[in-house]
Image: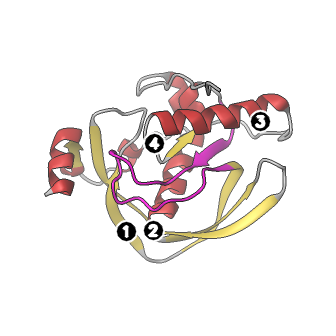
Amino acid sequence: MEKSTLDIVKLGNPILRTPAQSVSDITDPQISQLIDSLIATAEANNGVGIAAPQVSESFRLFIVASRPSIRYPHAPKMQPTPMINPKIVSYSKETVKDWEGCLSVPGLRGLITRYQAIEVEYCNREGLVERRVLTDFIARIFQHELDHLNGMVFLDRLESQKDLYSEEEYQKLIWD
Ligand code: ZN
């Protein structure tokens, strides 16, 4: 069966700068359909995460779907996980600076500082609250996607413009 994928909006689209609204009815079939489409869209674009505003749906909902791909060869493999109305409950003192990219910011990579570990809370697609500790790359994805729900992109967190690379130069670095 053909899975439906959605168009990803790019930097400059105002929806990426708009804080998203909470999902009030998680079991609404439209939300369920949006979750399935987001998972298919992340997969089709080799993304390790995708947030609803990136497909022009301004809801507090994202998918974390880490797996190795051409865009992230060293990513750990996990089941695509929908996280609805997500929040960070607590975070580590330790931070890590590492590479990020974004399906809405094609052609660029940046070194971004994130918390190494976070305790998070979100609703799953059945509407149940889940609390988990996320670390390293998965914690990074969560923090990146949460920014999208608040109208931010990773470029806003660059400490220096020297930390911004072209996709081409980034690929040379990681495959060397
Ligand atoms: Zn992004």
| Whether the residue under disc 4 has CB within 8 Å of ligand 1 | yes
Q: Residues in magenta?
A: 58-82
Alpha carbons under labels 2 and 3: distance apart: 28 Å
Specify which label sits upstream in the sequence, 1 or 2.
1
Q: Determine if residue 168 is in view.
A: yes
Indicate the position of residue 146 as horizontal and vertical percent values.
57, 49
Q: How is the image coloured?
A: secondary structure
| Whether the residue under disc 3 has CB within 8 Å of ligand 1 | no
Question: Decide: marks 4, 1 in contact (CB < 8 A)?
Answer: no
| Secondary structure beneath label 1 | strand
Principal SS element in the magenta part? loop
Q: What kind of residue is marked 2? A: Asp
Residue 163 versus residue 90 in the image, above or below: above
Residue at mark 4: 47
Q: Is residue 150 left or right of residue 94?
A: right
Residue at mark 1: 96
Question: Decide: marks 2, 3 in contact (CB < 8 A)?
Answer: no
Residue at mark 2: 136
The quarter of the picture where the C terminus appears is bottom left
The quarter of the picture where the N terminus appears is top right
Viewer-nearest residue: 67 or 156:
67
Q: Residues within 10 Å of mark 1 (few under 14, many from 20)?
A: some
Alpha carbons under labels 4 and 3: distance apart: 20 Å
Give me the residue at 58% from left, 35% from top: 40
Alpha carbons under labels 1 and 3: distance apart: 34 Å
Specify which label sits upstream in the sequence, 2 or 3.
3
Residue at mark 3: 32
Indicate the position of residue 74 as horizontal and vertical percent values.
35, 60
Q: Residues within 10 Å of mark 4 (few under 14, many from 20)?
A: many
Q: Quadrant of residue 96?
A: bottom left
Q: What kind of residue is marked 4? A: Gly
